[in-house]
Amino acid sequence: MTKTGPISRRDVSSALLALGALTAGCVPESRVDDANSRATTLPKAGAASTAPAPSSAPAAPPAAAPPLIVPPPVPFDQAIANAAHVVFTSAPAPGAGPIRIVIDPLMDGMTGYQSKATQSIQDQIAAIVRRDFPRYDVQRISAESLKDQPRVLMGTLTSVNADLKPAGEREAYRFCLVMGDLKSGKIIAKQVVRSHIEDPDTTPIPAFGDSPVWTDDPSIETYIATCHGSKVGDPIRQEFYDGLLAAALLGEADEAYDAARYGEALDLYTTARKTPAGDQLRVYNGIYLSLTRLGRNTQAMAAFRDLVDYGLRKKRLVVKFLFRPGSVRFVGESNLSGNYGMWLQQIASKAASSQVCLQITGHTSPTGPAAMNDSLSLLRAEYVQSRLENEQPLLKQRTVAAGVGSRENLIGTGRDDITDLLDRRVELRPIVPCV
């Protein structure tokens, strides 16, 4: 049960001890707009507040809000350096001695993906801290680094339009950087900057790029909301604390998978599944991918069924079917494309046995005429629909196909490569009620 009272340090310590025993054997961005956030410092302890003198004069009307000042985008490395210096300069420095800070891996503000860009941000920040803020001891997230309730650094990188919204034509990347203190349970520093749209290499790291399924995930939403929806002085969300156990293991699991240590990755993903926050998409994707790489095909098929079940439970199952450019046929050279038949079979079987109706929606990138994209997205949805109905004829009266072109892009950069693959997705959503 999620607690509604103040954050309990005893609970956090107990949870971290539980993680040690296990290992021994950010709301999507579209729902949050914090473009006016500014990094500030907390008031000093004991500072007195001055009460206004009483007055009999009528209250003046409230002043109009100042117009939004949008700083111009700057080169990527400069934007990261600017944000890091503001956050580490404005964060209060307690006492003397070293300050431990853990980096909870940064992610894309819409998809939750980690990429070469987010990894480079972490490396750049670590170098800046070692050079300019030597009191800080920067560490990656792990069971060991979390034991003493350190400060934690989190951040998101999101493509946005001229109004700083993740919609329409993207013009820049917005980078949000937040520092929280696990001991006090507070957000203690924050900054938002913009970089040039063409600068970051947003190629997903293998653990995310290889994942066959995407959907809304509460653990990712909590991370993104903690970054985007918070201001200095706010309490850290209890759900964020609850997810630290799984986050520590998943960080290590993703590193093992990216290094092709698939047996080790499988052990870590499986252990993460046993934590209180283990029911999450990254866990199910990781288990499926590791089993696939290890050649355990029967177990991998069962793991994919778990992915389908998770997506249907969350009312949104996004499958990364890779189509040939301008075509409704699947590509043949994807390193996982050989599994498309199995994916379709398992989706059809689960939909039929669950007696659900499905809306199948095709999407495209913004490249090309809008009318053509609308037509192509519908044709792709209809192709997937026909494949599912061939697998399970019972679905012929229980599916409907639609195409939305590029109107619901998650990435929106129009690069038409692996960085915006999710913009060319096919979504399956249960229809309630099923008629």
Image: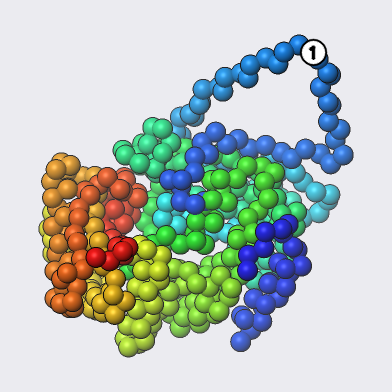
Residue 53: x and y in percent read 84, 19
Q: Residue at position x 71%, y 54% from top?
A: 185
Q: Residue at position x 58%, y 40% from top?
A: 191
Q: Position of 142 compared to 332: left or right?
A: right
Residue 84: x and y in percent read 60, 44
Q: Position of 313 compared to 226: left or right?
A: left
Q: How many marks?
A: 1
Residue 187: x and y in percent read 67, 48
Q: Secondary structure at mark 1?
A: loop
Nearest the viewer among 419 and 96 is 419
Q: Quadrant of residue 88?
A: top right
Q: Position of 397 compared to 110: left or right?
A: left
The quadrant in which the N terminus is found is bottom right
The quadrant in which the C terminus is found is bottom left
* Residue 339 visible, this orientation: no
Nearest the viewer among 217 and 164 is 217
* Residue 37 visible, this orientation: yes
Q: Quadrant of residue 284?
A: bottom left
The outermost residue toward the top is 57
Residue 3: x and y in percent read 67, 63
Amino acid of disc 1: Ser
Q: Is residue 323 above or below residue 390?
A: above
Q: Residue at position x 64%, y 49% from top?
A: 179
Q: Residue at position x 34%, y 78% from top?
A: 305
| Residue that badge 1 annotates | 56
